[in-house]
Image (cartoon, rainbow, N blue to C red):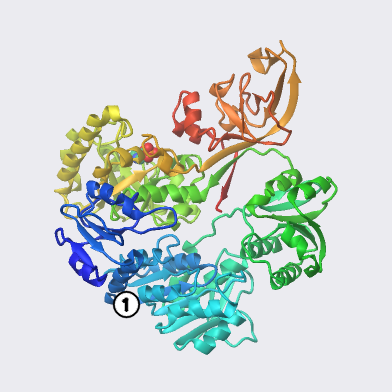
Amino acid sequence: MKIGEIAKIVEASTWSEGSNSDIFDLSVDSRSAKGSSNELFIAIKGPNHDGHQFINELAKKGTRNFIVEEGVRPIPDCNILKVNSSIAALQKIAHAKRIQFKKEVIGITGSNGKTIVKEWLSTILSNNLDVLKSPKSYNSQVGVPLSVWPLSTHHDLAVFEAGISMPGEMENLAKVIEPSTGIFTNIGTAHDEHFGSQKEKIEEKLKLFEKSESLVFRADHSELSEVINKDYKGSKISWSTEPDIDSLVKVEASSPKNIKVLFKGDHYTFQSEFTDEASLENLIHSIVCALHLGLTPAQIQVGIAMISPIKMRLELKRGVNNTYLIDDTYNNDLAGLTKALDFMDQQQQLAKRSVILSDFVQNKSTNEFYAELNQLLLQKGIDKLIAIGPELSAHKKHFSLESKFYDNTESFLASLSKQSFQNELILIKGARQFAFERISKLLADKGHKTVLEINLDAVTHNLNYYKSLLKPETKVMVVVKALAYGAGSSEISKLLEFHKVDYLAVAYADEGVMLRQDGIKLPIMVMNASMDDPYKLIQYNLEPEIYSLEQLEAFLQAYQFANKILPAHLILNTGMNRLGFNETDLNPLIERIHNNPHIRIESVFSHLAASEEKAHESFTKEQITQFRQYADQIESALDYQPIRHILNSGGIIRHNADQENMVRLGIGLHGIEVSDLHADKLQNTSTLKTVISQLRTVKAGETIGYGRRGKAINDMAIATIAIGYADGYLRYFGNGAAYVSVNGQKAKTIGNICMDMTMIDVTGLSVEVGDEVVIFGSDPTVSQLAKWGDTIPYEVLTNVSNRVKRVFYSE
Ligand SMILES: *Cc1c(COP(=O)(O)O)cnc(C)c1O
């Protein structure tokens, strides 16, 4: 669209004119605005920020087009469109885009599962179609139009989600999305203060589908289905798992892994890894919609295989007195509780079940709510309830199961003796402010507990941050060598596949084989494939980096023998002097690949030796220039264009303009910004934790540990923690070179680090045996530790040994 056209669409009252440029990008966030002349910045006023404040700054950066709702002084060469409401203008632009698109558009709303259904359905459809979907959970008044904007003729189909919090909002979103097919996921039990009744809330959400031809919903949700049957005019694609409920599609989840669907007279069976109720419902919505759209069951099954469960914060651990704990001390809402209870239901170890529950801070307390809660607990077979908080206590009378009530966490802790719980499965679920981690700490078995916790949300955040620095068309290869920098390659790769990165890279063939065995389907480049590896690469569909003529010959021979085309990534040496073709190799190389039908050059690349260092900037620039020359030479001998790439994490930050067609992201994914320019934009992903095994006091003059290197000058309190150099805590960190955090307090190491244990100085600190100790995480950070150890963050991360259990979570 041209800006002139947009001015008409938004009915701009004034338009101070610059040139009539084409608009490719919309932006509402000054931080991620690119500063290009083909960008339109829409200044939005929010409760905590005002986009109008950034207009001059953006104009300096190069942005030339603005929509404003406040008077702004003209800026030379800029188009400034004044409107009444910026958000309404944004929606009008998206609406204009939407009505040009004549193919299928799917709209999704409901209380829970919108984002998941959108992601899963898109994954299933993407195997066969070019699908546009909303990014992340873009479902608001601003997020929806931004999702719709990229719609283009090359797309076969689009999937958008819509969420509302107030009456009146859905009509706007309906105009922007205009879904031809709808999915109404479900309606939550949360009593929302903005809606008079549940029915009113359903009616409002249903407005999204006023013009849609068909609507997928679950007939088992009785209130929802009543409203739809009464008000909805299009074709109703209802599904149900209940034999007695009238529905178009019948579903039977006989064993959790088998989903049987009776659709238009035919029976189909699908397999999935999901076993909890909520995931199954989301998956069945996706399956029914895909069948309705005409995908074959085989196509759908391939798609389902690509969606795999990500491990959640819900984790089962051993507790005291032969108990097991399921621990979720971060939030509490009814949907989350239902999910946790389902998870509990799947655990077969112990018959007796207890729930320790805090007040629900987000729900309005009504009698119905507590009656429903009691019903839910009974239905899930809970024997005992410990209810903590004034709201729960005030509604005592609604609970018919064995229950005890406490006003706050402290009074419960005071009453807790070690014998309070025995031989039972305990769910601990509380809102953040109740700090239930104090309960789980007391009830948890204090076994050997050195773990590396990986926050998958932070990994996603970091990926998205790097993506925001790239042109939308730049591909992303993520380097997951060395167990994804120690984090765990399969889990990280699954997440990356979910977020649709373009490529993975590993160092050795076996690392790629492992990823394939764990079901990773993304293309994988192997950086140091040895001459013995071709058959392994062929068998597991891995793509070698080719670095020498000799290696090229060996691979060509093997691939030809197997009757396969060699998918090669050529690395060019431009100054790293590690692997790669030198300038003098180029002619023979080109001769060998020119018109050679047995090889396909997937990519041509080089590696920077000091991308993160300002001091070496001119060297880096030279490397890049040389790379381009070499790559041009190679390309001129081919009748197709291989992908080109040279930037690693540091390069993306420092040499952003040289993205070529792809970048190779490594350490940045793990929250470490080596050039130290954007460090505050990344999130910490990895926390290495252990516990205190023993406390002792030592007298002035005594020594601590091997070689008597630690000396007590005064009387001291010493704690022994369960981590040593065999876990990756380097000997360098001993003798006070590093500190750890215990309950938020810093404690320095004392004496030499042992193989499996370390002593720390806890003099004057409040600590107990069993307390958690953070080795690295948000404080101290990996980078800090690297400095103390006279090494680099890469080494600290990849040193964490296999003995240390990895725990992945997502909040
Ligand atoms: C490890 C590696 C990367 C990733 O580097 P980071 O600095 O971690 O981003 C990229 N390319 C090659 C060839 C590598 O070996």
* Residue 228 versus residue 324 in the image, above or below: below
Q: How many numbered badges does the structure rendering display?
A: 1
| Ligand 1 lies in quarter | top left
Local packing at callout 1 (Cα closer than 10 Å; few below 14, some 14-19, many 20+) is few
Q: Quadrant of residue 176?
A: bottom left
Residue 362 visible in the snapshot: yes
**Identity, as a three-letter code, of the amino acid under mark 1:** Lys
Q: Is residue 409 left or right of residue 32?
A: right
Q: Is residue 61 left or right of residue 666?
A: left
Along the line of sight, the residue nearer the viewer: 96 or 71: 71
Q: Quadrant of the N terminus?
A: bottom left
Residue 292 visible in the snapshot: no
Q: Where residue 177 sits in the image (x, y, percent)?
A: 37, 74
Q: Where residue 288 sits in the image (x, y, percent)?
A: 49, 77
SS assignment at label 1: loop
Q: Where residue 22 sits in the image (x, y, percent)?
A: 19, 62
* Residue 120 versus residue 438 in the image, above or below: below
Q: Ligand 1 closer than 8 Å to the CB at disc 1?
A: no
Residue that appears at 25% across and 53% down: 598
Residue that appears at 46% across and 87% down: 235
Q: Is residue 792 left or right of residue 155?
A: right
Q: Quadrant of residue 669?
A: top left
Mark 1, residue position:
103
Residue that appears at 31% across and 34% down: 611
Along the line of sight, the residue nearer the viewer: 210 or 463: 210
Q: Quadrant of residue 499?
A: bottom left
* Residue 397 versus residue 731 in the image, above or below: below
Q: Where residue 543 sits in the image (x, y, percent)?
A: 35, 49
